[in-house]
Amino acid sequence: PPAPLHLAPHPTPVPASVAMTTAFRFGYARVGASVLFLHDASDLPIDATRVCRALGWLRGLYFSVVATLTSWAAVRLYAFPRYLVVGALFDTNMNRTFDYVGAQGLALMYGMYAVPLMALTALHYYWFAYLLGKAIQQLGLRRKAD
């Protein structure tokens, strides 16, 4: 049997925490709650992968790896940038909410709000490529060189 699949933990808590904190602080609780919800929802298959690996259940492991890759592609690579990041960047009304801080303060607040969301999106693509490569390597789907 192939070696058990090990998916490394992903380093998204820092940008996710910054994005959620700034969203809550600047009055955009829907963005912070959405970041939290989408990350928790797409982490469930990773948790299933860890459980199947610990139990030595290969069939469940293969299924959970496919579920992990599918959920990451659907939630973190499509839904997160398409609906959450684009909506947060272009459908914002920070200039009406925080008109008392001036243009420089507003630019700083917008940067603190937008940069972590964009960094998080870049990390999602990086870690999906890593997870896909790890799954291919560990499941034995890569061709061996002669």
Image (tube, rainbow, N blue to C red):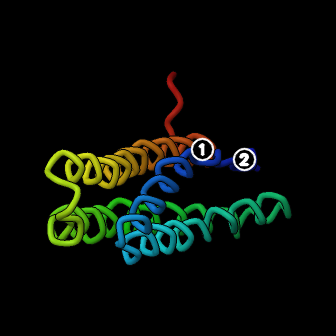
Residue 89 at x, y = what percent? 21, 61
Which residue does the image show at 58% across and 65% down from the upper left?
Answer: 43
Q: Residue furthest top?
A: 146
**Left or right position of 25 against 45:** left
**Left or right position of 122 against 54:** left
Indicate the quadrant where residue 19 lies. Answer: bottom left
Task: In the rendered structure, find residue 140 and report the number of the disc placed on it.
Answer: 1
Residue 95 at x, y = what percent? 15, 65
Task: In the rendered structure, find residue 120 and report the number of the disc placed on it.
Answer: none
Task: In the rendered structure, find residue 2 and report the number of the disc placed on it.
Answer: 2
Which residue does the image show at 74% across and 59% down from the upper left?
Answer: 50
| Residue type at numbered disc 1 | Gly
Pick whichever of labels 2 and 1 is earlier in the sequence. Answer: 2
**Left or right position of 107 against 126:** left
Q: Considering only vertical position in the picture, is 25 above or below 133?
A: below
Asked whether residue 63 appears in the rendered view, the answer is no
Asked whether residue 73 appears in the rendered view, the answer is yes
Q: Are marks 2 and 1 in contact (CB under 8 Å)?
A: yes
Count of numbered labels shown in the rendering: 2
Q: Residue furthest right?
A: 55
Q: Considering only vertical position in the picture, is 101 above or below 93?
A: above
* Label 1 crowd (10 A; few <14 / some 14-19 / many >=20): few
* Label 2 crowd (10 A; few <14 / some 14-19 / many >=20): few
Give me the C-alpha separation between circle 2 and circle 1: 7 Å
| Residue type at numbered disc 2 | Pro
